[in-house]
Amino acid sequence: MTVRPNDQRDQLEALYAEMGPSGLTPLWESLHALVTPEPVSPALPWRWSFGEVRDFLMRAGDIISAEQAERRVLIMENPGIPRQSAITPSLYAGLQLILPGEVAPCHRHAQNALRFVMEGSGAFTALDGEKAVMEPFDLVLTPAGQWHDHGNQTDQPMIWLDGLDIPTVRLFDASFAERLDVAAHPESALAGDTLSRYGRNMRPLRGSAADRRPANRPLFHYRYAEWRPVLDSLSSSAPVDPHLGHALEFLNPADGGAVLSTISAHVRNIPAGFETRPRRSTDGTVFVVVEGEGILLLDGREITLAPRDIVVVPSWTRHQFQARSTLVMFAYSDKASQEKLDLYREQLL
Ligand code: 1HN
């Protein structure tokens, strides 16, 4: 029997309509969109200017307290994947404001988080009761399952970028969270104690009750005062990588791996006048401009870069940086997850 095309379409549509209520759908209608020959990200390249977000955040600060909000954050949502609290399909980004005298109450959750300080000096994040006193462009980690609260005992607002793996944890349906019954975790150590124990390529020889940090994840504060000079010495002593500029990854000293189990982070210095060669990778990446001006070229589009801009480059998007002045950036991505799942790929063009 020969089936005329229109008859076939009608018959298929009738079949789909009948099977739908049974939780069935035909693969042949979606196979090519599901299994693409290369990544086709729904995310868009996008830039947020810090000043614009800051204005909205300060207005929110006039209306709602950090305590009431639990976390007073404006989410940077990728316009290509709206209403999912996602800046890339696997990652979240927000800007958090904590005003003088405020606390953000203690909680813990399955999601991994990093903080990258954008403005202010001297407020803290406490991890299991140990404070990290934060300065601009410091990186502070709050790994999955660890109690954390924030406080600002200075007279200036503090704003940082929150990077979390919220969409990843949602994908796996594995979210757990709980609040501590007091706003601030009892102090467990002097501020900076962990940094002095583990931040010098050393560790205590014998474990003791004072080693509160998990042995596989001791460090949680990576200071701008430490990383920035290293980028400079790299620039004067090593050839520049044509695709990255001078780049340094933040490491977990216990295993030499990424800083969080799902998130990798690094910093770059692209010398004034330098243009990176095009590259693309499967880890959609969030960049924060720390200093300098330049242009991000992607797929024929141009995004201008100024200090404290936040930009996202989706998976497998060919891109290049042009540095007008020395361009220093912080970046984070889901490369740590992808490497564990044998998914990560990079192409140098
Ligand atoms: C969180 O715990 C913080 O601890 C910030 O500051 C943003 C976004 C979603 C879920 C948990 C924080 C968050 C978050």
Image (tube, grey):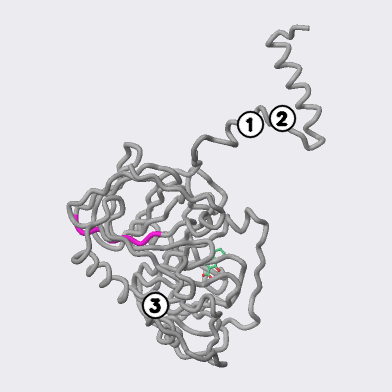
Per the rendering, the mark at residue 30 is 1
Question: Residue at 40% of width from left, 86% of height from top?
Answer: 196
- Provide the residue designation for mark 3: 134
| Residue sitting nearer the eye, 36 or 239 | 239
Q: Is residue 330 magenta?
A: yes
* Principal secondary structure, stretch drawn in magenta: strand
Check if mark 2's residue and mark 1's residue have beta carbons within 8 Å: yes
Quadrant of picture, ligand 1:
bottom right
Three-letter code for the amino acid on which mark 2 is drawn: Pro
Q: Is residue 167 above or below residue 143?
A: above
Q: Which badge, 2 or 3, is on the more N-terminal residue?
A: 2
| Residue sitting nearer the eye, 89 or 3 | 3
Q: Secondary structure at mark 3?
A: loop
Which-is-in-front pick, marks 1 and 3? 1
Residue 143 on image: x %, y %: 54, 71
Q: Which badge, 1 or 3, is on the more N-terminal residue?
A: 1
Q: Secondary structure at mark 1?
A: loop
**72 left or right of 287 in image:** right
> Is residue 261 in view from this perspective?
yes
Residue 222 on image: x %, y %: 39, 74
Please report the bounds of the magenta region as a residue range.
325-331
Three-letter code for the amino acid on which mark 1 is drawn: Ser
Query: Few, some or many C-alpha atoms within 10 Å of disc 1 (few <14, some 14-19, many ≥20)?
Result: few
**264 left or right of 51 in image:** right
- Provide the residue designation for mark 2: 26
Location of residue 181 by image quarter: bottom right
Check if mark 1's residue and mark 3's residue have beta carbons within 8 Å: no
Per the rendering, the mark at residue 216 is none
Q: CA distance from mark 1 to mark 3?
A: 48 Å
Residue 223 on image: x %, y %: 36, 75
